[in-house]
Image: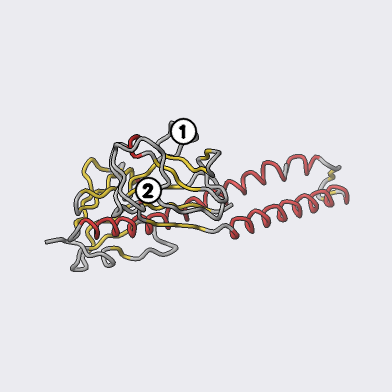
């Protein structure tokens, strides 16, 4: 008998959540997982295995069937990504602030830009400070608007067919064409296991428009995977998740 129930086993996260809380079917909190510490998540039979940096023992979350466990893994990954993406956006904002301070304002040059006298500053110095601070605020405002306009896209699909390890070719297993470009390399998971994208025909997986190969999502491109290089079969019950921020 399983200890966890699909659609019920996660305590919903909010903007203040630092961990994902997992509860059993009776409502008792069994685990609190920090997404930043997770190294691997995958489904084995009907059990989600979660491995972390903080422990040698896996967190085991069992469900009634293999199909339920795969769907639950997507649900768990989604909640973890909410927290991880919030951390990433906060880091991006901090880096933007630091970069703007480095390139937009040199406070030492501000004070050295004009003459100073005891207790007062010249009009030229005050004007330079005002102009540079105004430029800094404008640049920061533009950066924040860019971050706000980015969309958080997550796509979960099943393969269109079964592909075993005898298939030694890159296959468009989802028959799905991307519409929006990604800001950097997307995160791709097969049943919760991270899939690394390459930039050559020797890679296990890549993004392509049919001619060019990318490890980022471009307009009108598709995901290609080589089951032989993947080293395990792909089945129609698998859940492939693509998650990324738009440009």
- Numbered circle sitting on residue 221: none
| Quarter of the image where the N terminus is located | bottom left
**Closest to the observer, 190 or 149:** 190
Task: Tell me the residue at 41%/52% (across/down).
Answer: 174
**Closest to the observer, 120 or 174:** 174
Task: Tell me the residue at 52%/42% (across/down).
Answer: 210
Provide residue 171's location: percent of width, then percent of height: 41, 43
**Residue at the limit of the structure toward the top, as seen here:** 202
Label 2 neighbourhood size at 10 Å, few (<14), some (14-19), many (20+)?
many
Task: Tell me the residue at 67%/46% (across/down).
Answer: 100
187 vs 162, left or right, is right
**Closest to the observer, 142 or 3:** 3
Question: Could you say whether the residue bearing mark 1 is in a helix, strand or loop?
Answer: loop
> Which tag, 1 or 2, sits closer to the chain's start?
2
**Closest to the observer, 127 or 30:** 30
**What residue is pinned by disc 1?**
201
Question: Could you say whether the residue bearing mark 2 is in a helix, strand or loop?
Answer: strand
Provide residue 136's location: percent of width, then percent of height: 72, 51
Between the C-alphas of marks 1 and 2, the distance is 20 Å
Give the quadrant of residue 65: bottom left
Q: Which of the two marks, 1 or 2, is nearer to us in this view? A: 1
41 vs 112, left or right, is left
Give the quadrant of residue 164: top left
**What residue is pinned by disc 2?**
189
Label 1 neighbourhood size at 10 Å, few (<14), some (14-19), many (20+)?
few
């Amino acid at each position: 008998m399983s200890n966890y129930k699909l659609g019920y086993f996660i305590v919903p996260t909010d903007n203040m959540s630092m961990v994902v809380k997992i509860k059993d079917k009776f409502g008792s909190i069994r685990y609190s997982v920090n997404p930043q510490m997770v190294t691997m998540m995958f489904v084995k039979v009907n059990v989600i295995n979660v491995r972390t940096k903080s422990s040698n023992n896996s967190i085991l979350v069992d469900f009634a069937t293999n199909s339920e466990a795969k769907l639950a893994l997507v649900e768990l990954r989604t909640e973890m990504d909410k927290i991880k993406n919030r951390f990433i956006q906060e880091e991006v904002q901090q880096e933007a602030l630091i970069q703007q301070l480095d390139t937009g304002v040199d406070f030492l040059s501000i004070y050295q830009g004009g003459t100073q006298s005891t207790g007062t500053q010249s009009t030229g110095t005050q004007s330079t400070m005002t102009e540079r601070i105004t430029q800094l605020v404008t640049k920061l405002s533009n950066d924040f608007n860019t971050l706000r306009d980015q969309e958080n896209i997550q796509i979960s699909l099943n393969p269109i067919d079964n592909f075993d390890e005898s298939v030694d070719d890159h296959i468009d297993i989802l028959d799905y064409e991307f519409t929006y470009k990604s800001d950097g390399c997307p995160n791709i998971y097969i049943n919760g296991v991270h899939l690394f994208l390459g930039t050559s025909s020797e890679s296990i997986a890549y993004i392509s428009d049919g001619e060019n190969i990318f490890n980022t999502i471009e307009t009108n491109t598709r995901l290609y995977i080589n089951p032989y290089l993947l080293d395990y079969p792909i089945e129609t019950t698998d859940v492939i998740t693509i998650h990324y921020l738009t440009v």
